[in-house]
Image: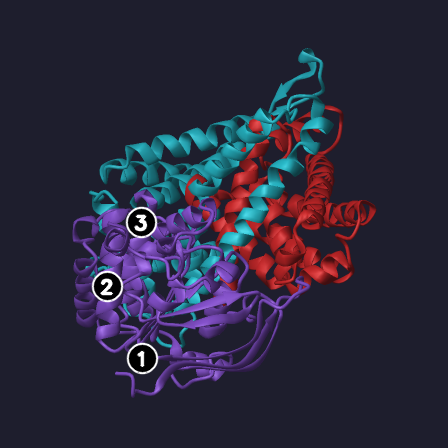
Amino acid sequence: MSPRLLALIPSAVALNLAIGFVVNQLGLPLYLDTVGTVIASALAGPVAGAITGIVSQTVRSLYEGFIWFPFAAVQVLIALLAGFAALRGGFRSVPRSLAWGLVVGALAGALSAVISWFVFKGVTATGVTAVTILLTRLGLTTPQAVTVSSLGTDLLDKTIVFLLAGAVLRALPERVLGRYPWARRALAR
Amino acid sequence: MTPRAGLAARAHPFTLFVVVAGAAALAFIVPAPAGPLALYALTAVLALITGNAGAVARAALVCLPLWVLLALLHGVGGSFDPRSLTVSREGLAAAAAQGARLGAVATASLVLFAAFDPSRFLDAVAERGWSFHAAYLVVATLQAAPRFRRRAAAILEAQRARGLRTGRGVAGRVRALVPLTAPLVLGMLTEADDRAMALEMRGLGARVARTPLAPPPRRAGDRIARWAIGALVVAGIAWRLLA
Amino acid sequence: MNDAAPALVFDGVTLRYSAAHTPALADISLTIRSGEVTWLYGALGAGCTSLLLAAAGLAPGHTGGELSGSVRALGIDPHDPRGRAGLVGRIGFVTAVPASQLSGVAATVREEVAFAPANLGWPVGRIEAAAAAALERFGLTRLAERDPAHLSGGELQRVIVASMLALGPALWLLDEPASALDRAGRESLRSLLAAEAGRGAAVVIASEDADTMLGVADRIVVLDGGRVALDGPPASVLAGPAVWQHAGGSTAIAALARSAAGLAEPVPAALLPPYPLTADEGVARWS
């Protein structure tokens, strides 16, 4: 691995964790813990993003217990899709970020639902599980409720992540972007 | 770094990772609900004996909301009408089994974190000739995380002092994220540039095996523990497949 | 040592960053010899940092942009990937912000200083001896077991220099290494640079701090707009009027003499260039 990635990835992971902290401070019902992963993918390619995702989940597991480690698969999926979005100029404008955020949110939500059901018997982060329980009370079966709540949360969360990542990338000075060849395509300037 | 006491801290770092992986594997192998419950009890007792009461308590705290949600999700049926609520014995058993799995894994991993010494871990990886870069990423992140958190808090304060409104509705708070995140990312990239150059000049990309400075001793006890856990997992799988 | 092979040779080097309109370095030709302290001096944006980055092979590789002309550091092209490998550990590279140069994984100052030699696969005994000597040399032994994250800016800057010193580099490239140092720290840096040059290393240091550099630098190279504007012994270059046009600064005493000359009309002979550079020279001239 190049020293550039060795320097960038820990910062991107720390960004994931720090944004989680800011979201908490602002009292938002979101995670946004993949902003660093998406930005790493858009700047340095999907492999950098995927490693960021795996390290994020490893470090969170060290802090909070390895129970959530299987969700590293979702981080990797998001990184790969964000890399693909970058190739297609997915961060060039607000509508593009929005569209890619919805696509990634749908796929990530589907994968989360599968992991949540098979590994965790339906529980994920507390807020999502509360929605799942609410849906079972409305008459959905538990697998249906898990799918709907995971999809709903991830659609909202990943859309905001992509909008936020796009806004931040577009705000970066040319001097900084010039160092990351992937960023040029992501913003297609 | 304060010196850490206790069996877990003296153990080879890889032994602790094997314990966590073993606990996670066994949690899903042993028959529910008695198996996971017994495993959780065993993990907690072992943690208490080795002086890790804090990790046991913290794991319980992490798992508590999940236990409640599992019980509600699987154990309690019916609609919103309180009269329609039914309690399912099977459902509660399934919830207890899953809750115990989470408890066992959380306890084992928080013991690991309490005993985790980054320098020993790096030296252990270097001594084995495994990917030092992968180990570097994890340890560098553990060092960077508190720094970024402090910086995020400082930026939040500074932007609020400059009149950024962070309190109005969900949409307003989401919009407020951009002026909070942009300086954080710009700072992160500038720092990453400098660090990348420094790491390169300090030979992190060099194609030679890194010297372990003070690798943890390889004790027979560690080796026996790792093999025993591995054998237990294999035996468990074989038993479940044959039974 | 002046007859030794040159440590650093720039031949017609031009460096352009991708987002910039003007080149950061414009047709620089320069030869730096081993055993000498060469002081790079210039206003912000004059090209001092870029010259150091290009010498280490880090620009344009890390910064983006294009480089033309030829650079040879210790006889090796630092921009050639194969050449670079042979240079790792032989260049002592220090930038102005110490915190972002930390390894990011060391729990103690001793581990921080041992980080680079360990990466290069040195035997443990040699690493320990080199780290202990570097810490001792820079007065850091009492901080050896401290966490680098809890050091002050000045302490951190000394740790960074010590972590390069442990490698025993043949070429030092330092960018404002004294920016966070106190008076005592600057004094130990001066004696370190002199000792390193005496050992036969080539020392190239970009610094705005004329009062620290004077007396230790053998040569000053003044950069202006990415070009070499002046080049010579510091005493003659700094005492003349030309340095004011190109770099807009000099020692505190010279600045005093110059502003006094600007105030007086007609200018008394005592305030005309060459300006005094040190307090002692000022006292000798004006008393």
For mark 1, what is the residue?
Answer: C34
Q: Chain of mark 1?
A: C
Residue B29 is at least partly visible in this image = no
Quarter of the figure that contains the N terminus of chain B:
top left
From the rendered image, report the letter of the chain displayed in cyan. Answer: B
**Relative image position of residue C153 (x, y in whole percent):** 34, 46
Residue at image position (28%, 51%) is: C286
From the rendered image, report the letter of the chain displayed in purple. Answer: C
Residue at image position (43%, 37%) is: B103
Q: Chain A in the picture: what colour?
A: red
Q: CA distance from mark 1 to mark 2?
A: 15 Å
Q: Chain of mark 3?
A: C
For the residue pair B189 and B36, the one nearer the viewer reads as: B189
Q: Chain of mark 2?
A: C
For mark 3, what is the residue?
Answer: C181
For mark 2, what is the residue?
Answer: C192
Is C6 situated left or right of A47 in this image?
Answer: left
Q: CA distance from mark 3 to mark 2?
A: 14 Å
